[in-house]
Amino acid sequence: MRVIPLGGLGEIGRNMTVFEHKGKLLIVDCGVLFPEETQPGVNVILPDFSYIRGRMQDVVAVVLTHGHEDHIGGVPYLLRERADIPVVGSELTLAFVSAKLEEHRITPKLQQVKEGQRRSFGPFDLEFLAVNHSIPDGLAVAIRTEAGLVLATGDFKMDQFPLDNRLTDLPGFARLGEEGVDLFMTDSTNAEVPGFTMTEEDIRPAIDSVFRTAPRRIIVSSFASHVHRIQQVIDASARHNRKVAFVGRSMVRNMAIAEKLGFLHVPKGLIVDVKALERMKDSQVTMICTGSQGEPMAALSRMANREHTIKIGEGDTVLLASSLIPGNENSIYRVINGLTRWGANVVHKGNAKVHVSGHASAGELVYCYNLVKPKNVMPIHGEWRHLKANAELAIRTGVPEAQVLVVEDGVVVDLVDGVAKIVGRVQAEIVLVDGMTVGGVASEEALADRVQLSNDGAVTILGILDTRTGALVEPVEFIARGFVQDNAWIQGATKSIDDALRAANKVKIVDGPELEELFTQSVTRWMQRKYRRIPVITSVVVDA
């Protein structure tokens, strides 16, 4: 069996792994990665489908382990390539992905499964096991083929007091271990964290304290799929006689789905429309919105920037009830500063115990390695430091170092006769979604131009050329954006062009295209030397 990760290794997000056996392909997860500040204008980042694009008819199914965006967000783009790929997952996961596909006007071929079931897709015999995570209805998947048995955990932890009483199926892990797990693919996100992850129940006192002491409105920000955390907020609101309104399209949609399916329990009359809050006392109001990662267009970011209809005021309490994803720190702190500026008391993981992770810490991972006793290990889901830390845990439990494979996206691993080996590499670039464009013009080069524009600005140079003499009919005009254009700058830029043109005309009379290149190069050199700036320069020359 061949294993090809196309996303999720060396990064937090866009998780996707392809399994290949007997000419057929099985995909586990297809998520997105959210852009960083160095990727302006990008909506989301997808796995690279290049390896499977010419073999879409060989794909027997895409299995989704749970309903977070970093595991399901790429499904609409995958189904654009072939709409009838069976989409396999638990009830809540399929409900979330169905709502997403409806927005893309795609009717999926869904196959619902639950823990304890076995299903075959082509040469792959799949068994599903319950795992606990920060979203309900998560699944690990055991993949049996003639080449061996693979156990992929998805995102998981071992919460012993989960809000939904659904424990990670450790007896199932042990049973598979007795059968013989040839390749164990384990969640690495918390591998650097010692001990065991706190239980979701442990944050109840901190949340209750916020609700007990907040004098005015409480605005809670969370992932739109973090059902367990939102359940805690709803319970606290009910205890403290506050009505709850959901803010943001994805939050409203997902919580309606979760309540309808019985994964979110809401007392009758507790939820109200956000417009109804205007008629209530501030001390009776809770709002739950998106934006815990500082996303520019999310509700909380727009509140911080005074661009939302909900205006943050003195005495409001904002509770950030999600983790801080690596790479988002600056955006999050910018939102916190903005909210604080308007008078809000911002409660977050850094100053109160209002968040617990949804991922297994080192102690839990070691426990699983000792339980499963895998022949080979391939850490998944994490940045390099997480993958390395997870690998070291596996080695300490007795897995031979040579059989612990720390790989990156695109590395091909073959499982043959119980031994996993790296055998090559396939293309696995990042694919940018820019507005309605997927890949193509949304390239690394385009991003580099955007970053350069933001740092150094842009200059347009307009000249009118006498083609007979090679001289300019009148002085060039400049249109500058992104830096101060004063008389000294205009004189210096004009002189650099005049000097370059005089030198060029001594050799031959320059024409329009040559003069445009001359304008660009001369002003670029002069600005780099004078201002330590390299703006994006566009030169236009017209004939007199």
Image (cartoon, rainbow, N blue to C red):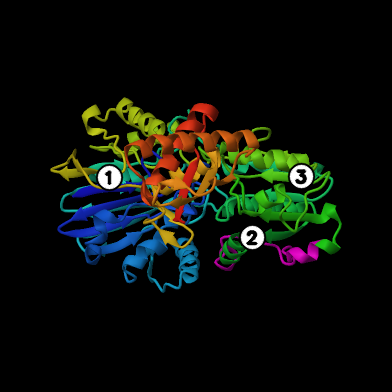
- Left or right? Give the position of 263 relative to 206: left
Query: How far is disc 1 from disc 2 in space, using C-alphas?
Result: 36 Å
Q: Residue at x 65, y 49 (%)?
A: 301
* Residue 361 in sight: no
Q: Which residue is mark 3?
A: 317
Residue type indicated by callout 1 = Gly
- Residue 20, numbered label: none
Q: Residues within 10 Å of mark 1 (few under 14, many from 20)?
A: many
Q: Residues within 10 Å of mark 3 (few under 14, many from 20)?
A: many
Quadrant for residue 21, please give it.
bottom left
Q: Is residue 476 above or below residue 127?
A: above
Query: How far is disc 1 from disc 3 in space, using C-alphas?
Result: 45 Å
- Residue 410, numbered label: 1
- Left or right? Give the position of 103 relative to 506: right
Please state which of residues 103 and 536 is positioned toward the viewer in this rendering: 536
Quadrant for residue 54, please give it.
bottom left
Q: Which residues are magenta?
A: 258-277
Sequence-earlier tag: 1 or 3: 3
Q: Is residue 21 above or below residue 402?
A: below
Sequence-earlier tag: 1 or 2: 2
Q: Position of residue 291 (x, y in %)?
A: 62, 50
- Residue 248, numbered label: 2
Q: Secondary structure at mark 1?
A: loop
Sequence-earlier tag: 2 or 3: 2
Q: Is residue 273 magenta?
A: yes
- Left or right? Give the position of 485 relative to 34: right
Q: Position of residue 266 (x, y in %)?
A: 67, 62
Residue type indicated by callout 2 = Gly
